[in-house]
Amino acid sequence: MSKYTEDDLEQELKTQEYKYGFYTDIESETFAKGLNEDVVIAISKKKNEPQWMTDWRLEAYRVWKKMEEPEWANVHYTKPKFQDIAYYSAPKEKPKLNSLDEVDPELLDTFKRLGISLDEQKKLANVAVDIVMDSVSVATTFKKTLGEKGIIFMPISEAIQEHPELVRKYLGTVVPTTDNFYAALNSAVFSDGSFCYIPKGVRCPMELSTYFRINEGGTGQFERTLVVADKGSYVSYLEGCTAPSRDENQLHAAVVELIALDDSEIKYSTVQNWYPGNKEGKGGVYNFVTKRAICETNAKVSWTQVETGSAVTWKYPSCILKGNNSVGEFYSIAVTNNHQQADTGTKMIHLGKNTKSTIISKGISAGKSQNSYRGLVQISSRAENARNFSQCDSLLMGNDCGAHTFPYIEVKNKSAQIEHEATTSKIGEEQLFYCNQRGIDTEKAIALIVNGFSKEVLNKLPMEFAVEAQKLLEISLEGSVG
Amino acid sequence: MELTDKLLSSYVAFENRVDTNSDIHEIRSKAFQNFENLGFPTKKLEAWKYTSLNSVLKQDYSLFPNKENAIQLADVQKYFIHDIDTYKLVFIDGKYSSFLSESTHDTFDVCLMSAALTKPKYKAVIENYFNKIAKKDNLTSLNTAFANEGAYIYIPRNVEVEKPIQILNFTTGSEAATMLQPRNLIVVEQNAHVQIIERHQSLTSNPVLTNAVTEVFAAKDATVDIYKIQNDDTNASLVDNSYIEQKSNSIVSVHTFSFGGNITRNNLNFYQKGEHIDSILKGITILEGKQHVDHHTLVHHIEPNCESHQDYKGIYNERSTGVFNGKVVVDKEAQKTNAYQKSNNVLLSDKATINAKPQLEIFADDVKCSHGCTIGQLDDDALFYMQQRGIPEKEGKALLMFAFANTVLESVKIPEVKQRIAKIIANKLNVKIGFDL
């Protein structure tokens, strides 16, 4: 076998095409392009929402109209034209489903090609999946099993109908409509998403999972996720995203709100594999997401993310550690290739006493991509004995990419202990040589090293998801991960 | 009158009074226009996110103190490093004091900016270096617009300056509030070597605002050591803009000791334009009261095989605020760069604040870059150990803090400066022990 060098890898990376770029031909019902109050009201009507929800959306829309698009992130792109987007797109035949058999076979086939066979998951992985395709849930499984425990897991549109008191109590409490440009936009036009409520003292027996996929061209995906863990409960939530190949840039502006009440724990894992654009940097998804969690006393929230897709990523899953002894964690792998740009990180806001946070961020840049870590650790003056450990490591492959770190540390309490460290490196020639000496070819060696580099984060993923995450790493860095 | 308006209206008069050289005139008026457009920095600017000048800009500053103010050597001797022989450039209320100074033109020039800007003898150097690397940002532009007086140091090839050069700026407080804008130019030619000590000192508690700009050029194989001692009155604020350009094999170190002042902002910028360069940025900050110090550093690695080392220690008491915003940029061509950045901080009070932003921007793959930032407290066990052995709590704490800061102090090359800093630290920590060096 001829010698496989880093240059070869680079070559492969450059030419790796998006494997999930197929388009499901389901007849969709799409609103005309553009956004105004009528569209907001129409979306609300379409969803048969109560008046308070419509008002809430309109208020968000009015706030959004006055806001300016943020420009501080270390990314460059043509701004989306907000009047050129269709704000609602739903598969036309919305089936009422009792079992998987009733799902449109073409749609099922889509998911099969994505590698998440529902049947298989149902049988083997014991995962309840709430699939969101172009913003509308079409399949919900395991609802019954969950129902017995009192767990509510359903599309948020249904939750607004069935549990309005819960949705109304918590929606917008962590990410208010006025929070930022994209959160306001999302609040105004979100078409669907997931809602999850775990009652007091209940440990959710299975991993909850949602799959997002942008299908229709020229549509924005605005989903809204709300997870509420009541006192003493536990839930692990998985979220995966893919989008088919499209030439125009698609906008994805989601909002995720997590509420962890006293003594509860939420584990939120994301594998994001939106279409990154082709190797000339044409097309791809703009991923502008607002994710935030609030932790009450003794609560714990753990964010794990594997970011391999999107042309532009702009995402900072955050924790507000409000209660005493609460814990926030952030584990992230961000891989960028070709012309991808990622500006991602976290915010840990320590308000309560004895709060702890851990940040592990691994960035891998290849091709002509730019990868930035941007994070904030804030210790308020009343947060006694707060503890934070942050580590940001970057791995550079090739000479056309960049890795950047923008950590903000703001401390107002003397008992705080903060550590931050960051390193930037490339795959060492000695490391490769050592492996070659021992009969491991260069390709395998690079795989080993990249795997080792990201192991700390991959280990945090639930078993069911780790396999998929590795698969996605493979796609992004084909030939380097075994 | 608003300070901005005052500056704008006094510019014409200033120009008429000092301008004799058309090149400089052009530079000044461009800079002035620039400032007119930009205005003073606000917290909305990312670079000024953590530092607000609002309270400082409210004062009614006198821009050009008219009175001649003579001060006696005995009154100010304590601010000099007086136990060794040095060259001195002393400015009183922005005016040169030949009585207190000791300049030279023998083999090299240690003299006045105002002379250098006007005399033909210096024209070539001024043309080559003046305002060449200073950023065109708001405060630097403001300084450039009013650039007239300051230190001018030119060290020709292969000259090793045998004694350090002190640059001292005194404010007498003869006016209710004074604004100063010293402008320094330091050119160190190939294989030359110089040590410079810089200090700003207000002699009364009348408010002072100093907006200083220093440009340093280190040619091939040159060595430059700069020590900035900032232990001013708590009503004196300082914006220190330093720009340093280095050529191959040169070594430049800047030590910043921030103990005094009201609001102190250090903009320290290094540009590495050659290979095998070493840039050293170190600092000790010990603050109390409502003091505020902002260290804003930039090291720009432009060519391969260079190094940079940053090490900043901060101790913050009472209501003081410390900011560390360090930025390392590694260009695509700058392979084999080693860049280190470290910021360690101790908070002694719940009212004190630290804002840190150690930033890396890397475009080359074969580099070793790391940054570390810690915030913590003194070790209780170590303190207890000392107390057990009869060292009182206050002295024990002082010893621990001194040990914490010592890695920076150790690298000071002039023993007298080292001793002076140790003394200031002892004073600051209110202990009578001498830290043996």
Image (spheres, coloured by chain):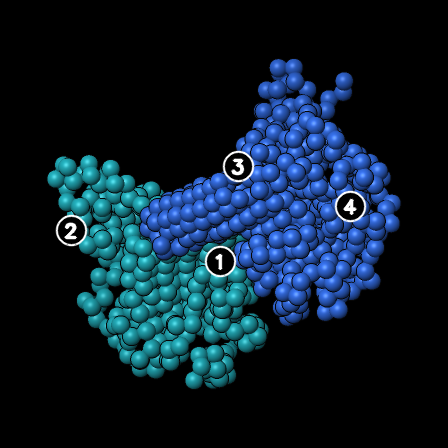
Chain colours: A blue, B cyan
Whole-number angstrom distance, CA of label 4 to CA of label 3: 29 Å
In the rendered image, residues at marks 4 and 1 fall on the same chain: no
Chain letter of the residue carrying label 1: B
Kindly report the distance in space between the C-alpha atoms of the residues bearing marks 3 and 1.
60 Å
Eyeballing the image, is A174 above or below A272? Answer: below
Where is residue A156? Give x, y as percent: 66, 51
> What residue does disc 4 label?
A96
Quadrant where the N terminus of chain A is found in the figure? top right
The residue under label 2 is: B432
Residue A403 drawn above or below residue B150? above
- Mark 2 falls within which chain? B
Circle 4 or circle 3, nearest the eye: 4
| Viewer-nearest residue: B413 or A260 | A260
- Nearer the observer, disc 2 or disc 1? 2
**3D distance between C-alphas at marks 4 and 1:** 69 Å
Chain letter for mark 3, please: A
Element type at mark 1: strand
The percent coordinates of residue A391 (x first, y second) are: 50, 40
